[in-house]
Each structure stands twice: as C-alpha cells, then as structure tokens.
Image (cartoon, coloured by chain):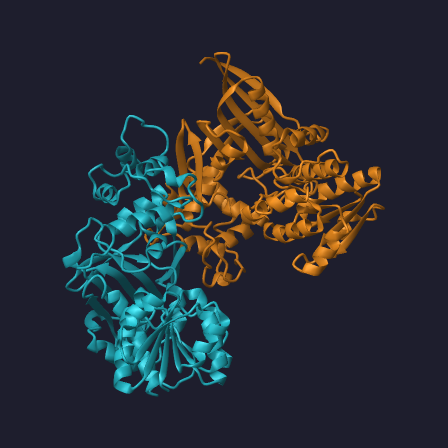
Chain colours: A orange, B cyan
Amino acid sequence: MKNILIIGAGRSASALIHYILEQAKTNGWFVTVADNDPDLAKKKVGDHPNGRATWLDVTKPNDRREIIERNDVVVSLTPAHLHLLIAEDCVKCRKHLVTASYVSSNLYNLKDKVEANRLIFMGEMGLDPGIDHMSAKKTIDELREKGAKITSFSSYAGGLIAPESDDNPWNYKITWNPRNVVLAGQGTAQYLEDNQYRYIPYQRLFRLYKMINVPQYGEFEAYANRDSLLYREIYGLEDIPNILRATLRKPGFCDGWNALVRLGLTDNSFPIIDSENLTYHQLTEAFLSKGNEDLSTEERLAKMLRVELDSDVMQKLKWLGLFDHKKINLSQASPARILQQLIEEKWKIRPEDKDMIVMQHEFEYEMDGRKKALSSTMVMKGQDGTATAMSSLVGLPVGIFVKLVMLGKITQPGVQIPVQQSVYLPVLEELETFGVVFHDVETDLGPV
Amino acid sequence: MKNILIIGAGRSASALIHYILEQAKTNGWFVTVADNDPDLAKKKVGDHPNGRATWLDVTKPNDRREIIERNDVVVSLTPAHLHLLIAEDCVKCRKHLVTASYVSSNLYNLKDKVEANRLIFMGEMGLDPGIDHMSAKKTIDELREKGAKITSFSSYAGGLIAPESDDNPWNYKITWNPRNVVLAGQGTAQYLEDNQYRYIPYQRLFRLYKMINVPQYGEFEAYANRDSLLYREIYGLEDIPNILRATLRKPGFCDGWNALVRLGLTDNSFPIIDSENLTYHQLTEAFLSKGNEDLSTEERLAKMLRVELDSDVMQKLKWLGLFDHKKINLSQASPARILQQLIEEKWKIRPEDKDMIVMQHEFEYEMDGRKKALSSTMVMKGQDGTATAMSSLVGLPVGIFVKLVMLGKITQPGVQIPVQQSVYLPVLEELETFGVVFHDVETDLGPV
C-alpha cells in the first residue's frame, strides 16, 4: 500500500494532513488531498514532495470512483451525508475507509460486504466521538481485567477556551461548527441513574446542569447529552445502573444560555418574517409579551427571566448584543440563524487565542468488598486560534489509525468504531506523545 | 368538459366525493376516484352510476399521467409532498387542478406555464386554509368598499367537539390528523400588535393564550399560529397595525397542554431508547428530576408544575393515562409519538359524537370619524363521528369550486388561492345552503 486519499480539506483537516504528510515522507507514501475548493486543498498540502492537492466534487460518481480507485486508504472528512457515497465506492474498489463521524445505520448495513472483502471501515475516530471511546473503553477493560464491577460511568467533554484566552462574560468561544453550538441539546436527553431512566426535555436542559470538578481546573457545569444510553452496548455496560454523557461549560454559561432558550432565540424551524429589516433590539423586544411599556426592553426581559437587571445573566445577554440597535441584515432567517450570526462575531476565536479540550471520565466500581471511585482526566490546550486543540484531537487519531493500517499493524476487517484493544492501545499510545494524557485519581469510598 | 378525477379517498374526501357524484348525476359528468387503497375508493363511490373507483400509486409516473390525461379537472387530496408530481402532469396534459392544501413555493413556480396554458390551479380551497380566506376576504373587501380603514384583523378557528358530545376533562376530541394535534404550535408564533412584531416561542405558547368570546358559545382560549404575518399581503393588509391568526380550544385546554410540553412529551426529534418495554408511568417518572423520592409520581409532577394535586391540570394528565402502569408497546418511539398513541385512544371521536367547527374573524376599523368593531362568526356541527363538520368543510369548498369550473363559471387562469371576489362569492353562497353561515355583530367604539 502506497497511496492515501484525504477527501475534505476544511478546518478539521489541518492537523491530520500535516501528520499524514510527515508520515508519508518517512514511509515513502503519497497523499492526495481532494476538496471542492482546490485552493483550500493546495494551501493545506503546500509544496510537500509527498502530496498533491486536487479538485473533487464528491457528488460526481465518475470523478469520485476514479480517484478512490487510485488509492489504498481513503479518509472522508466530508459532511456526514456524503460518507455513504464514498463508502459504497470503497466497497466496490476494495479500499479501506476512515472517518471521524458517527457511523450511520446505512454505513453499518455495508458490514457483510466490507467483511467479505476484508476491508477496514473505521468510523468515530476523532475526538468526540473517538478519543472518548478509546480512553473510556481502555479504563473499562482494565477495571474488568482486575475483577471490578462497574456501577457508574459518567463521561464529560467540552471544547472550551483556555483560561489565559478567556476574556468574555460567557467564558466561551467557538472552536467547532457554530450552527451546532446554537442547536446543541435540542431533543430529549436520556440517561440512567440508580437503574432508573431519566429524561430531560430541551426546555429544562440548561436549568438541570450539574457541577463537576476537574482537578487543577476547578468547577464546570455539565448538561446531559441525548445519547448516553446508546453507549451501554458499545462499551459492554448493558447492566450498569448509572450512565451519563454530558457537555462541559464554564460556570454561569448554562444560566445564560437558558435565558436565550426561554426567550426563543434557539428555534430553527421557521423564518422570522422581515428579519432583514429588524435590529437585534427589535427582535428581542418582539419576543417579550405586551405590558410594562414604561420599562426598558432590558428591564422587561429581566422581569420575564426573574433575574436582577445587573445579574450575570443580563450582563451576558447585553454583551452578546441582544439590545443593540444594529440591523440583523439576514433575510428570512430563523431565530437560531440570527443567534448564530451574533455568536459567530462575539465568540470568535482570535489568532492568538488558545482553545482547551477537557475530557473527564468518572467511574464507580466495587472490588474486593470496597467501593471505589476513579476519575480519569485529559486537558489539552491549542497553540493558537488556527492550530487549535480541537483540530488536533479530531485529526490526529484519524492520522495515527491510517498509519497503522498502512503499516499493516491493524488488519481486523469490518465496519467498526475504536473500542477494541488492538485499536485503542496503539492509537492512545501515540496520542500520548502529542500530549493527550489522561490523569487518573482513585478514591476509596469505603466498604460495599 | 365531462370527466373529473379525485386522487385520494381518505377521511377528508367523503363529503367531497358525495357532493361531486350528486353533481355528476345532474350534469352528466363522470367521476373517477383513485387511491392507493382501491377498497377505500370503492367504498366511497359505492355503486353510483356516474362514478368508478380505481387503484393508483401516485408515485408511478406512467399510471399517473395516463389517468390524468383522461380527465378534465383533477382534485388532489394526497399528502402535501405528492401535489407537485400531480401538478406537473396537469401542466403537461393541460388539466385544471384543485387542492385543499397550502400552495407550496414549488407550485407557485409553475405559474407561468399554468397561465400560458390558461389552466386554473386552485389551492387552499378547504376549511383552514380555504373558508377562512374566503370569508375574511369578503368582509375585508366589503369594509373597504364602504370606505373603512381597517386597523385590526384577528382570525380564530378551532376544530372542536360539540357541547352535547363533550364528555372528557380536556373538552377535546380528535377530528383531524392526530400527529398534527401533538406537534401543533412548534416553531415561533409571529403576529403584529400596535404595529410591533410579537413572537412567541413554543415553550411559552400555551401559557400566553388569550380568551375569546364566541356569541352563544361562550369563552374559548386562543393560542397564536405561526403564520399570521404571511396573511398581510394575501389579504391586501400590508399596512395593518394589528394582525393575528390563532387556534381555539375550550377553557383549561392550554394549561393542560402546557404541562405536557413542560414535561417533555411533545418532542418528536429523538426516539426514547427501550420505549417498547416502558409503561406510561415509567415514562412520566423518567421525565421528573431526582429528589423527593418519598412522594408519589403524581405528587412530584404536581410539584414540578407548581399546581395542586387535585388541580384541573393534574386531573387532565391523570385521565389521559400518564400514570397508568400499562406498557407503551411502541418501539423506538419519540415522546411525541407516544403521546399521539395516548390521545388517539383517549380523544377518539365516538360514532355518535358530533364535532364542531368554530371560526370567528374580528375586525376593528375607522369610518366617518368613528371607531368600530365587527365580529363575524361561523359555528357548524357535524352529524356524527363519521360525517363530521371537519370533513364537510374541507371537502365542500373543493367540490363547489370544481363544479363552477366544470360549468365554465370560473375561467380566470393561474396558480391561485380563493381571495378573489369572482371565486369567494359563488362558493360562499352555495356553502350557505349547507349551513355555513357567518353571523356579524357590529359595535360602535366611539369617536376616532
């Protein structure tokens, strides 16, 4: 095997392309980076002797098949709905496939063909999903190995801003898809507590956060993810009485965001008529009920939210620009789209900013008649606003895995996610050299 | 013109088919009723000498084109996404088209071709949309005709249960698509009040209802629709300072429904894992936060909703079955889907029940130096649980319009909705013979 194809050269591809090109130099491989925007691909490849950039419209079957045919391992970093097109061609052309995205049921349906052709289709090989699977599964397997009975598993992760670059009242900046930031949490969060299902609907989600302590970094708020229960089977924890996956934010964030939800600014289902002619102030005003016309918009919103005018929540909303007499300038935009425009500007990461990924798994287990707690924490900061920890931690696991496949060190065929020891051990081991280190703290909680 | 094609023989088609068959007898026409379910079509046509039933899968282009080709006027009562297929064939085969559904932008895009072929494509020709357009526009045109300046227009409509058949604590039964009953109001309601935009997000919608008096029928709750602002242009009310469209329910309904929204039972975006193994009681329990384990589920829910255990709201929820130890028996179902199953059973209309349509338009206007109010109300009851007012009022306007086209009394080509005098006058006139009568009450509000 000599040739690697990377489809997609966007924000999350930088660290991956850099890593793979270095490996290509060492091992005599050749890397093709294909994107709809050939200039973007060119910029990422530079004049590296082992790489070339090319234009590709993934929706064109002939072009797609032709370029896949000429490579051995294919990495797809395209939007999720395009993975299947690429995957089907990989089956036909008998090529391995790696992605950082969730594995859809359509992709799982290719299982038999993938296995029959002895191909490796690895999905969820990024940060979250990706590093979360590998690090959690490693600890779970280790605990089981020594005879522990796991009674509780909670996994927390957040893409945050490092303390030294944290200079706004929300203590948050955007390091991933801003649309997903706005729509985060919509649906019904589901988890297990004391063997009881717990559901939280969206409109109560940002009120029902819990506080988590991260050693050396202090307190964080954690709100529940929708998908906690799906991880029981994947991790072999079918009978566990407590399982929770949650998202981390700095203290105060959830109260502020809850105010935006309550006001109505996160709805994405219907356009605001005439939105291009409104100011943010008019938008906010329109979401308040009639009455109290003698009060200012800010005073009326504070009243609706039942907070003080000088509260942290109101300061956050004011800083975000909800009361600005500035035109929205977006036509037929939903409230969520308008909010996205606001946060894209206000929460923009600056060139000198460092982002920070925090991931913490918390286990409780019983062993030798004792109850014990184990907390396993990874914190990683980015270099700057471009070389973010987010982009490294999404791209590096993919890159390392591709290398392992190219070197013939991973051969197990099938449609997979990285929960097997033969995969997570070498990937986590190499990730450590990039500073991805989990620190464990064990506590004895007394007799069972 | 001799031949009429009705595509779709479902619940809303009965009154239409009955009416058109009678007209066919009088005028020597022939009616074809086509449905995916030929038995359903047969049942509706019976052995009427002027009608036949036939099987049709609308998604099959050849079958579709062939049957359209053989007719002069086509009525489409199919699900909304199939109208366009039928409309495109009607253009190609040069046939007129009538539907009771909202006119999509795709359908409007056929405008030029429809006009060039001198075809009549009439949409929104049912009850709501339909009778609401015609009755409101008639009054608007009359007020303008006599020199009035309209300052406020509110339009209320509800598909309800008649008082004599009203025997449950919600004072509501289902007479239309139960899925839409569950999802009603999701999005952002938008209207105009004193020249100010007002927006209400879903999670506050059922708290912010207002009370409306309907002469002889008493008080109703009205919650705002999403689309009020869209009607300004359609009705020629671009500069009106107050416009609202809202849905009517019996008093107490909105507080009860708001409790279901708050609990989280109307979310349709994500399946409840393991839903087939849960009871309704367990589902409700899971939506409550931890704590107060000494209290019953009912007590804890009452506490969360801040109502008394014996309040009307709690009685409604209990009656609906939220605390029943009965299996849900739906696999991978969203909360909304589960709630739909509950209301389909509990709010089922019985064979002997009468439904009741209430529609009320309220205008304020200035004329000759006086401020005046005009309220225009239509109430209609069904005969029984099958021959509902809902099905009559959706089907009859379509039928009457088809007759007018067949008789050559309507000839204006184009993609339209019924807001022109030449359309609404004859349709409303004939609807009166079926009991669709609006009663007007005028009030003088004093000098301007």
> Which quarter of the rendering shows the C terminus of chain B?
bottom left
Q: Quadrant of residue A112?
A: top right
Report x, y in % for residue B442.
Answer: 20, 72
Residue A212, image x, y percentages = 50, 28
Residue A242 occupies quadrant:
top left
**Image coordinates for residue B422, horizontal then vertical, percent:** 33, 83
Say whether residue B380 is left or right of residue A277. left
How many numbered discs sit on the rendered protein? 0
Residue under the image location 27 percent in, 61 percent down: B158
State the residue at coordinates (54%, 51%). Answer: A340
User: Where is B175 relative to A364, above or below?
Assistant: below
Judging depth in this view, the residue of A176 and B293 nearest the camera is B293
Q: As drawn, is A225 to the left or to the right of A110?
A: left
State which quarter of the image contains the N terminus of chain B: bottom left
Q: Nearer the viewer, residue A357 or A296?
A: A357
In this rendering, the answer to whether B398 lies above or below A358 is below
Q: Is residue B109 visible?
A: yes
Let me know if residue B141 appears in the view.
no
In which image quadrant can residue B175 be found? bottom left
Vertical arrangement, residue B367 with respect to residue B242, above or below: below
In this view, the residue in front, A114 or B151, is: A114
Q: Residue A128 placed where, x, y %? A: 59, 38
Q: Residue at x 40, y 81 (%)?
A: B71
